[in-house]
Amino acid sequence: MNARHCLIVLSILTYCAGCADDTFVTVSVRTSAGSLDGVAQLRVHVTNASSEDVLAYPGKTSQPLHLDTERPVTLSVEFKGWSGEAAFEVEPLSKDGTPMAYGKTRALVSKHEVTPIVVTVYPATARPEHPQGGVMSGDPLWCGPPAPADSCGPQRTCGVLCSPDTPAASMCYVAGAGGPGDSCTSNGDCAAGSQCFTFGASGCNVMTCRKYCQDDGGCSDSAAFCNVPLPCGSTTFSLCSRPCDPTLTTAHGCAPGLACFRYSGDTTDCACPGFGGVGATCTQNSGCSGQFGCAGCAAGLGCVMPTGTEAGTSNGVCRPMCKPAASGCPSGTSCHPFDDSSRGLFGFCQ
């Protein structure tokens, strides 16, 4: 592949008679949030299945660049005698050459055409030194979330970017101090191996750190299990469940605003609470986000399904959670074990 940097924007390329036989990709760079000032240069890695070129924009010292979410900085990459799929990684650099952000995307380059792409850079993230799976792969996982030190180095972690219509992508950034279940406002608040996720439902919007895992041994708490799926593109990651007490109406073990619910096998996890009180019809434990027919239960309750059914296949009833060893059920009711309980930790009052 022969890729070289051209200081030509799309509007000029459209009318450039001398460019008729050339192939270009215009790269528009913007931030994921906020703005970046004092960007001395953009370092661009252009990669195909067998090679990589590293380009610089601007080529010489000039006025600092400003990046934000609305007005992208656009440059172009010229290809000679090649077409196919290529990856584009962008690192905004400070005056002393320190990376300030990082972003990547991929595009199909067609001969004799101008292909516009957008690369969103994420402040305080960094490009991994050793991409996983080679130069290109089915999903561009450049680092491994469960074991970030292997590809990101010490004091850094690996986070996943995920949307329904694109493959999973991952990137390295400086790790924070937040442990599993701690409140967070961004990925950088969470410790290595964890990431900041949003729990959302009607009347609830809470962000907490969650830990990636490959098996139960990768979860930091002995009562946590590696059984929470995170579908992302064609890849499914696993997260640790959150140990908590589903019998309490307070957020014991969960971040403020979340409630603890009991799931199959006496696993517990935190989620947004619903609005269903004792005896209310429900379709799931936690709160809903406006889906037709969806109904969840309030904190301290669980959606108990008829024997032999699972959540989503039939309506259940919101019932108080209890501990068989301590009961605590309202007068006139007793603590019944769940059919799928192998440890006998929790039950429901009826």
Image: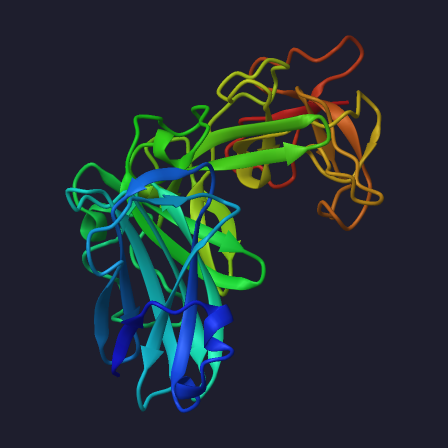
Relative to residue 3, is residue 319 drawn left or right? right
- Residue 74 vs 176, above or below: the answer is below
Residue 42 in the image: state x and y as whole percent.
28, 55
Viewport quadrant of the C terminus: top right
Q: Residue at x 30, y 26 (%)?
A: 177
Q: Residue at x 58, y 34 (%)?
A: 199
Relative to residue 331, is residue 30 drawn left or right? left
Q: Quadrant of residue 179?
A: top left
- Residue 139 vs 92, above or below: the answer is below
**In front: 64, or 322?**
64
**In front: 328, or 293?**
293
Residue 133 in the image: state x and y as whole percent.
28, 68
Residue 103 in the image: state x and y as whole percent.
37, 54
**In front: 267, or 1?**
1
Residue 17 in the image: state x and y as whole percent.
45, 86
Residue 60 appears anywhere in the view: yes
